[in-house]
């Protein structure tokens, strides 16, 4: 029998296909080598952003209150700001609330607020137009009733309205979880720094340097807090800004302890040591809770995937032998 021949696409021969695969393999190897040799420091961009924040605080304190005419460059952000001002979207209260929410996600620039508000304004319209194009021009929902098509378009508009909020909420949740994991270790280091005689801002700087690679989000917040403690006239405002930027009840407890320590002169090391022990116990209880939920979570995969395989392995030989006996008995 002649072996079945398969036609390769675009008139390619097996040699051409092998050459193409070899070229792709070489390209992937070169890409892997380039990625391994050009590893970037994850703290470089964070330090640059914090330095810009330092310069802004310094300029806001040292310069006079006279207003200076500043010529703004016309760019994409300025165009978005003009559109939002035309629709009266950039209100003071809304912008302040959005800025606090974006700061919790790690986006602290003024352009981030404009981009976020513009995305909330444009995303429903964009997704709605895409849905209408796909439904009525491309015929994606061909054969469906007009009511179903209208509901699909309306769902796309609602999804566009909620999409920016979902992205920000997801980012805030991930960042808060990363900060929660490193907070007990950071408090232990703060206790050591306080017992060594360092001030609060110096202790924050030292802890940020030590935890820069393990917990970059927490190091970022501590570094920014140390900068604000050095430049802001009210130290309590710098600590309050830390509690606003981090959506964690544990961080609010730390900030409250630091404020009471500076106000009443209570020992900082002992207070932080108690908080560290509480956070470690809370982390252990959270791990035990996840472990206790594991049997219930594993029930569905066990029933759907593991038990059928066990039945096949255990009962398969017996079923085969019984079938052979019946076949031989019939013959």
Image (cartoon, grey):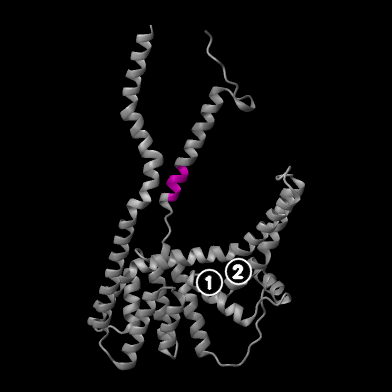
The local secondary structure at tag 2 comes to helix
Label 2 or label 1, whichever comes before in sequence order: 1
Residue 125 appears in the rendering? yes
Mark 1 sits on what residue?
102
Q: Position of residue 100 (x, y in %)?
A: 52, 76
Q: Is residue 31 magenta?
A: yes
Q: Nearer the viewer, residue 276 or 20?
A: 276
Residue at the image position 51 percent from the left and 27 percent from the top: 18
Q: Position of residue 116 (x, y in %)?
A: 60, 69
The answer to whether mark 2 and mark 1 are in CB contact below 8 A is: yes
Q: Position of residue 103 (x, y in %)?
A: 50, 73
In screen coordinates, is 137 left or right of 189?
right
Marking on residue 116: 2
Q: Nearer the viewer, residue 168 or 206?
A: 168
Q: Quadrant of residue 44?
A: bottom left
User: What span is in magenta?
Assistant: 30-35
In this picture, is 258 found above or below 164? below
Question: How busy is the neighbourhood of tag 2: few (under 14 within 10 Å), some, or many (20 plus)?
Answer: some
Q: Nearer the viewer, residue 185 or 8?
A: 185
Q: Position of residue 111 (x, y in %)?
A: 59, 72
Q: Quadrant of residue 315?
A: top left
In screen coordinates, is 27 left or right of 114?
left
């Amino acid at each position: 029998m002649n072996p079945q021949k398969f036609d390769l696409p675009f008139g390619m021969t097996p040699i051409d296909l092998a050459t193409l695969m070899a070229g792709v393999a070489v390209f992937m190897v070169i890409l892997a080598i380039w990625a391994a040799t050009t590893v970037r420091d994850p703290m470089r961009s964070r330090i640059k952003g914090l330095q810009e924040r330092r310069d802004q605080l310094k300029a806001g304190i040292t310069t006079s209150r006279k207003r200076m005419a500043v010529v703004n460059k016309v760019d994409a952000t300025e165009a978005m700001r003009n559109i939002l001002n035309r629709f009266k979207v950039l209100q003071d209260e809304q912008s302040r609330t959005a800025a606090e929410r974006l700061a919790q996600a790690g986006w602290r620039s003024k352009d981030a607020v404009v981009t976020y508000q513009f995305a909330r304004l444009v995303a429903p319209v964009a997704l709605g137009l895409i849905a209408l194009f796909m439904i009525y021009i491309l015929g994606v929902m061909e054969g469906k009733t007009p009511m179903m098509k209208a509901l699909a378009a309306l769902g796309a508009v609602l999804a566009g309205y909620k999409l920016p909020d979902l992205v920000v909420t997801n980012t805030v949740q991930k960042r808060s979880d990363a900060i929660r994991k490193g907070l007990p270790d950071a408090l232990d280091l703060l206790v050591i720094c306080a017992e060594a005689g360092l001030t609060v801002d110096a202790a924050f700087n030292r802890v940020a340097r030590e935890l820069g690679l393990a917990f970059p989000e927490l190091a970022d917040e501590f570094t920014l807090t140390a900068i604000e403690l050095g430049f802001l006239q009210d130290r309590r405002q710098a600590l309050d800004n830390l509690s606003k930027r981090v959506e964690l009840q544990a961080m609010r407890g730390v900030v409250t302890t630091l404020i009471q320590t500076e106000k009443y002169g209570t020992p900082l090391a002992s207070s932080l040591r108690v908080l560290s022990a509480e956070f470690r116990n809370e982390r252990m209880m959270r791990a035990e809770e996840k472990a206790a939920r594991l049997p219930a979570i594993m029930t569905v995969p066990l029933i759907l995937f593991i038990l059928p395989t066990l039945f096949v392995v255990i009962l398969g030989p017996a079923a085969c032998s019984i079938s052979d006996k019946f076949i031989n008995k019939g013959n």
